[in-house]
Image: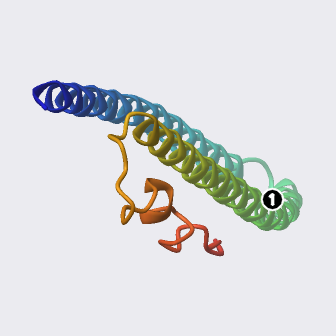
C-alpha cells in the first residue's frame, strides 16, 4: 500500500512540475506577443506621425498666385490622404478580424486536442488499473464502466463561437 501512495505522490509531483513548466512557457509566449503588440503600436504611431507631417506644407511662401496654386495642391493632397486613410482603416479592420478568427480557430483546435489527450490518459490509466487490479469478486464492476468519459458526458461537443 505504501508503494502505491509513493507512486501516486511521485506522479502528482511530476504533474505539478509539468504544470509549472507550462505556466513558464505560457508566460514566455505571452511576453513575446506583448512585445509584438508594442512594436506594432509604435509603428502605427510613426505612421500617423508621417501622415500628419505630410499634411504640413508651407502654404504662405511665394507670391499670391503661387500661394493660391499651392493651397489647391495641398487641398487635393489632403483629400487624397483622407481617402487613403479611410481605405487603410478599412483594410486594417479586415486584417484584425481575420487575425482574430485564425486565433479562435487555433484555440479551438488546441482545446479539442487537449480533450483528446485527456481521454487517452483516462483510457490508459483505466487499462493500467484493470491490469493491476486485485482479483475481482462477483459484485465488482470493471473499472471501465465506473467512470468512463462517455458516462460523464465528456464527449459532448461544445460549439465554439
- Please state, as top left, top right, bottom left or bottom right, where the C terminus lies in the image: bottom right
Q: Nearer the viewer, residue 18 or 144?
A: 144
Q: Residue 119, image x and y in percent?
A: 55, 50
* In the image: residue 128, left or right of residue 47: left
**Residue at the extreme front:** 138
The residue tagged 1 is 74
Inspect this view and state whether residue 52 appears: no
Q: Nearer the viewer, residue 36 or 111?
A: 111
Q: State how many labels appear.
A: 1
Q: Is residue 85 above or below residue 113?
A: below
**Residue at the extreme left:** 2
Q: Residue 94, image x and y in percent?
A: 78, 63
Q: Secondary structure at mark 1?
A: helix
- Please state, as top left, top right, bottom left or bottom right, where the N terminus lies in the image: top left
* In the image: residue 132, left or right of residue 109: left
Q: Quadrant of residue 93?
A: bottom right
Q: Is residue 108 above or below residue 126?
A: below
Q: Residue 106, image x and y in percent?
A: 67, 50
Q: Residue at x 76, y 56 (%)?
A: 95
Q: Residue at x 39, y 61 (%)?
A: 138
Q: Nearer the viewer, residue 45 or 1?
A: 1
User: 10 Å neighbourhood of mark 1: few (<14), some, or many (≥20)?
Assistant: some
* In the image: residue 70, left or right of residue 149: right
Q: Residue 6, image x and y in percent?
A: 15, 25
Q: How is the image coloured?
A: rainbow
Inspect this view and state whether residue 142 appears: yes
Q: Quadrant of residue 73?
A: bottom right
Q: Residue at x 65, y 72 (%)?
A: 157
Amino acid at each position: 500500500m505504501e508503494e502505491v501512495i509513493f507512486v501516486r505522490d511521485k506522479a502528482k509531483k511530476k504533474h505539478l512540475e509539468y504544470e509549472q513548466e507550462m505556466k513558464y512557457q505560457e508566460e514566455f509566449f505571452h511576453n513575446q506577443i506583448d512585445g509584438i503588440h508594442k512594436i506594432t503600436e509604435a509603428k502605427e504611431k510613426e505612421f500617423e506621425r508621417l501622415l500628419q507631417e505630410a499634411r504640413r506644407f508651407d502654404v504662405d511662401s511665394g507670391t499670391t498666385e503661387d500661394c493660391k496654386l499651392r493651397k489647391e495642391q495641398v487641398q487635393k493632397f489632403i483629400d487624397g490622404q483622407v481617402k487613403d486613410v479611410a481605405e487603410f482603416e478599412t483594410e486594417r479592420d479586415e486584417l484584425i478580424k481575420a487575425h482574430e478568427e485564425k486565433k479562435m480557430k487555433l484555440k479551438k483546435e488546441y482545446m479539442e486536442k487537449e480533450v483528446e489527450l485527456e481521454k487517452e490518459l483516462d483510457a490508459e490509466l483505466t487499462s493500467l488499473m484493470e491490469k493491476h487490479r486485485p482479483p475481482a469478486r462477483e459484485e465488482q464492476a470493471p473499472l471501465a464502466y465506473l467512470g468512463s468519459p462517455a458516462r460523464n458526458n465528456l464527449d459532448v461537443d461544445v460549439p465554439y463561437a
